[in-house]
Amino acid sequence: MTLSDLYWLGVRYLGRHKTDAWPSPVMAALRRFVSQNNGKHLHVLGTHLPETFGCSHPHLLRMESYERYEGHLMPGLIAERVAEFKLYLGMTLDRAGVPAVLSGAIAEPLAREVFKTLKMSDAWDWHSVIAAYSKIDPQSLLEVLPQP
């Protein structure tokens, strides 16, 4: 399951269940966070969707499953669906405690590191891209962090 899928699963869960079936510290923390942040700034972490959404600026939208895109003849739609790098970068910056202002300096070197070992079997091989994203962690982020 990808990071955007988890995000939208959480949104749907909170919308459907106003209370939890049993006490959970994770759900209590999630509900506290959501009550203080409406998520409107998360769109910047979304992808550009000119083919899917007809728009040239980023949107964090709930998209169809990856499997729905495998049958399309042109790979542009699956490319838009799999373009979740900024979301993984934002999560990892937060986990590592690195200020978001450094994301511009980190994004390109980190993308080079992540994608240099990516081997896709064809243009619709979204599994390999998601596996590459899963390698993004605080340590890989710190390795490309510019030194003062």
Image: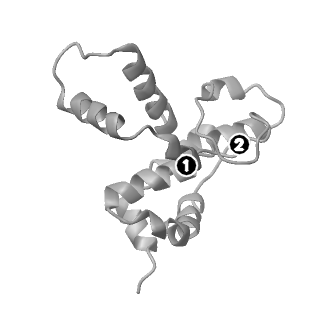
Q: CA distance from mark 1 to mark 2?
A: 16 Å
**In-front residue for pair 24/57:** 57
Which residue lies most toward the right here?
Answer: 73
The mark nearer the N terminus, 1 or 2, is 1
Quadrant in which the C terminus appears: bottom left
Residue 121 versus residue 110: which sits nearer the camera? 110
- Measured along the vertical axis of the image, is residue 136 above or below residue 63? below
Residue 99 point in image, percent of width and height: 39, 66
Depth-wise, is mark 1 or mark 2 nearer the camera? 1
Horizontal and vertical percent position of residue 75: 78, 39
Tell me which residue sits at (76%, 47%) in the image.
Answer: 56
Q: How many marks?
A: 2
The reply to whether residue 75 is visible in this rendering is no
Mark number, residue 79: 2
The coloring applied to the image is one colour
Quadrant of the image occupied by residue 38: top left
* Residues at marks 1 and 2 touching, judged by CB atoms closer than 8 Å: no
Question: Is residue 115 something one can see in this rendering?
Answer: yes
Picture quadrant of residue 77: top right
| Residue at 22% across, 30% down | 28
Mark 2, secondary structure of its residue: helix
Q: Label 2 neighbourhood size at 10 Å, few (<14), some (14-19), many (20+)? A: some
Residue identified by numbered label 1: 45
Residue at image point 52% right, 65% down: 110
- Residue 36's x, y, as percent? 33, 40
Would you call the spot at circle 1 few (<14 residues within 10 Å), some (14-19), or many (20 or more)? some
Q: Mark 1: which amino acid?
A: Leu
Q: Is residue 49 left or right of residue 45?
A: right
Image point (48%, 55%), residue name: 89
Closer to the camera, 99 or 144?
Answer: 99
Name the element at disc 1.
helix
